[in-house]
Image (tube, helix red, strand yellow):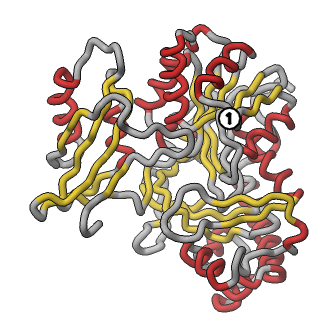
Amino acid sequence: MNSPFWNPKNENLPRADLERLQVAKLRRLLVDASERSAFHRRKLDEAAVTADSITSIDDLRRIPFTTRDEWMEAQDANPMFGDLLARPREDAIRYHLTSGTSGRNPLRVLDSRKDWQWISECWAYGFWAAGVRPTDTVFFAFSYGSFIGFWGAHYCCERIGSLVIPSGNMSTDMRVRQIAEMDVTTVCATPTYALRLAQAASEQGVDLAGSAVDKVIVSGEPAGSIPETKALIERHWGAKCFDTAGMTELGTICMFECSHQPGGMHVIDDHYIEEVINPDTGDPVGYGERGERVVTSFGRAMIPVLRYKTRDLVVKVPHDTCSCGRTFDIYEGGIQGRVDDMLLIRGTNVYPRAIESIVRSFDAVDEFQILVETIDNVDELTVRVEMKPGSSVTFGDICGELQEDLKEHHEMLRMNVAEAERGSLPRFELKAKRVVDNRRTKA
């Protein structure tokens, strides 16, 4: 199969035909959700929405939003899965939950055999677009725990026919050695952990740039679409870096970066409807405008997903922004941040993603952390950085320039920059959590 497309027919559908396909799938989803899921039946009945009332994509707006808070409240009221399930629990073959802790119970999901066929199919769109083929050897630098992470990608590679190497019980050093020993061609990790592997390889004297690796596929953090972070990964690995993004709530990826790398990710438009709305009003925004992405998923049988407010900030641009030929629209710059991870510092909006973009442009920085605290009743933000061992560039060499760059790109907001002791900042295998917010009252 020499096609650059995993599903040539759907990935090249004219937009009008694609919309007709979405409407047909949406109508089937509404029938299934209203008949089988008490959670969705209640919401759809309250909004007086039926499958027959949906005749165009614009009618989607009649369907009420689903929020994470509602999902969590349903789980709390009816442990462990709430009343969202549209299939008997006995149909499930897999159980996953969200990563991280927030003082609340995690969001829990079940998936059936049918779901997992779909999950691997969506991942295959992205991996094939990045150039993964049956001749590849794919290494998953992933813990294989209850976080859904790269599980679907693993099965997608088996579906493609690639040799798969899992590494759930390995240390970072062991993973580096096996990548070199097995002539791995594709490495899958979070952006942060891809950089950690590169650091460990350097310490061991392993030349990743001279290895067989020619593709690094990342997911789990917005950093994969930050040009400075992507360039850093590509420089260390001597390979192309491709971004993907998904959610535990969806079970799989919903966007991927193709080999033309247009500066963003294609939405898998034949399996999802992705809206972009004003997060304050709920009104739709047009191409080129930043807003919150809202997802309707056609593939998950156990848990229907209707107009789920993701809290992700995105900018959608037309499909022809990319020259690859796909008719799937694009999220420019991938996931650009979160509605709810914005930091309000002395009246200025600060996004951790924007700080990372600046910090990663300084090659001598090994790791960083964003510390927010209240000092003398004033909110202060400090970017703490660790310098790379053996670098001829010192903290004193970059401190002033880094502080000025941060200030210039944040409405002249003064930020502090401090050096952290070598090895004092945490390293991450899964999603990085670099913001430490110790304010007495958090904005």
Identified at 85% across, 72% down, the residue is 89
User: Residue 374 lies in what quarter of the image?
Assistant: bottom left
Look at the picture and state if 332 lies above or below 1. Answer: below
Identified at 53% across, 13% down, the residue is 204
The C terminus lies in which quarter of the figure? bottom left
Q: Nearer the viewer, residue 54 or 136?
A: 136
Residue 20 in sight: no
Image spot of residue 334 (x, y percent): 51, 44
Q: Nearer the viewer, residue 123 or 56?
A: 123
Q: Is residue 6 left or right of residue 68?
A: right
Task: Identify the secondary structure beneath mark 1.
Answer: loop
Q: Nearer the viewer, residue 315 or 157?
A: 157
User: Residue 18 lies in what quarter of the image?
Assistant: bottom right
Q: Is residue 192 left or right of residue 346?
A: right
Look at the picture and state if 114 lies above or below 320. Answer: below
Tell me the residue that label 1 is attached to: 325
Image spot of residue 51 (x, y percent): 78, 79
Image spot of residue 135 (x, y percent): 82, 20
Q: Is residue 131 left or right of residue 288?
A: right
User: Residue 364 lies in what quarter of the image?
Assistant: top left
Q: Is residue 233 left or right of residue 87?
A: left
Q: How many marks?
A: 1
Image spot of residue 222 (x, y percent): 49, 44
Identified at 78% across, 75% down, the residue is 85
